[in-house]
Image (tube, grey):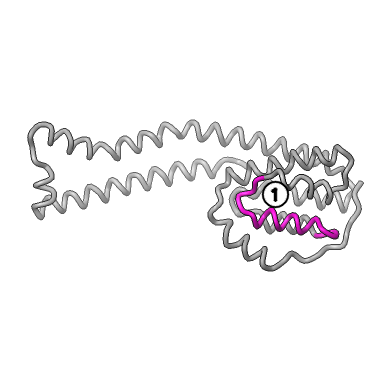
Amino acid sequence: MTTSRTSRPLPSPLKALAARTRRTDTPAAWHRATLDLCHGLSAELAAGRPPHEALARALPYVRFPTEAAAHMLLAATQDGGDVPAALRTAAPLHGGEGLRRLAGCWEVSITAGAALSGLLDRVEATLRASEAHRQDVAAQLAGPRATARLLAALPLLGLLLAVALGMNPLGFLLGHPAGLACLTLGAALDACGLWWTHRLVTRAETACPS
């Protein structure tokens, strides 16, 4: 059973730094960091250490996508800081579901007296199942990605084939108004195709349950 400690407000500079940097982080990196955090925290709790001390000992072994997240959580472990608030503040919009679940487990452990280690095991199992599903989806989407790149390169291959046959496609494309129009339209359509394929693949990846 854990006991409640006095909450301390999170440092404002760390909040601002986390808000600026979290946009560049990938959800997969956050999921891996959360898994490492849950595993390390469970090991420290199993060794008999209190939650705040266990978290402080586990943090140095976790590679968060941003240093602000690690500093924020480490600051929350000092002098009975508000760990759930720090976890929620550090969690990004995409990829931070595990940290928010961990925050909820921490609050339940404080308010209801539930064993934090047991709650952590459930969170870790859910995250591992989600990560396995995400990797499976990524493997299945590798084919469409490669096909899209191949189709985007076909016009260039066509130009090379025309040159090999003794034609002068570049002279028409670069030296004639109609050729310039065709080149511009073709490049625009090629870019739109790549963007649309990337958008579809990204949506399929982000649709994975967390």
Badge 1, how many Cα within 10 Å: few under 14, some, many 20+? many
Residue 73 included in the magenta stretch of the image: yes
Q: Identify the image quadrant of the C terminus.
A: top right
Residue 103 vs residue 95: left or right? Answer: right
| x 74%, y 64%: residue | 10
Tell which of 145 and 53 is nearer to you: 53
Residue 120 vs residue 17: left or right? Answer: right
| x 67%, y 39%: residue | 127
Residue carrying label 1? 99
**SS type, badge 1:** helix
Residues in magenta? 63-81
- Which x, y percent locates residue 98? 68, 46
Quarter residue 63 falls in: top right
- Looking at the image, the residue that sits furthest to the front is 60
- Which x, y percent locates residue 112? 88, 50
- Which x, y percent locates residue 164? 13, 32
Residue 87 vs residue 150: left or right? Answer: right
Residue 75 included in the magenta stretch of the image: yes
Tell which of 97 and 7 is nearer to you: 7
> From the viewer's perspective, is residue 134 above or below residue 58?
above
- Looking at the image, the residue that sits furthest to the bottom is 12
Residue 91 vs residue 183: left or right? Answer: right
Quarter residue 135 falls in: top right
| x 81%, y 65%: residue | 8
Which amino acid is tagged 1? Leu
